Image (cartoon, helix red, strand yellow):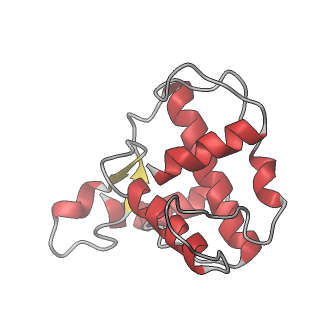
Amino acid sequence: SMFEQLLQQIATAGGRRRRSPREAWDEPLPFMVLANHEKAFNVEFAGEIASDVGGPYRHVMEDICAELHSAALPLLVLTPNHSQPLALDRGKRMLSPAASGAWALQRLEAVGALIGVTLRTGSTLPFELANVVWLALLGEAPSLQAYAKVD
């Protein structure tokens, strides 16, 4: 996945190694490498001629976001109300309760780093996170109404 390729590039830039893609790195990943550029990183598609003046970068960021919203990465799940046709905030995502351990934690840290990149660079990503998740990220206590929207 593009998300895993990005993590591998971040790890390589920081001299981190691991034995298998399903393992966590032994040390925290150096997400500060994303703070060095206006676009956080440059994109090169193997076998394609593309000048990364924004298009390929946006494409990769959107693909990463789509991967985060898919079953391919078990980090985010649909909120409990996703099957209710008249529910508020239907189709939004929350952190998966099953996302635990070092492997998941490193990927969730990467999601946080990507949110930071979007804030710093002014790029937008279609993160479909539930309001209660955004409130928690901001350090605010969600209200009972906020919880009612997702349950």
Residue 92, compared with residue 101, is above or below; it is: below
Horizontally, residue 140 falls left or right of residue 151, namely right
Task: Look at 65% across and 45% down and name the residue there.
Answer: 9
Horizontally, residue 139 falls left or right of residue 89, namely right
From the top left corner, tell me how far across and down residue 32 is, in percent.
81, 49
Task: Look at 55% across and 72% down and name the residue there.
Answer: 49
Q: Quadrant of the C terminus?
A: bottom left
Residue 141 visible to the viewer: no
Residue 24, compared with residue 62, is above or below; it is: above
From the top left corner, tell me how far across and down residue 59 is, in percent.
50, 72
Residue 50 visible to the viewer: yes
Q: Nearer the viewer, residue 149 or 130?
A: 130
Q: Nearer the viewer, residue 147 or 107?
A: 107
Horizontally, residue 121 falls left or right of residue 62, namely right
Residue 150, compared with residue 121, is above or below; it is: above
Task: Look at 34% across and 61% down and name the residue there.
Answer: 150
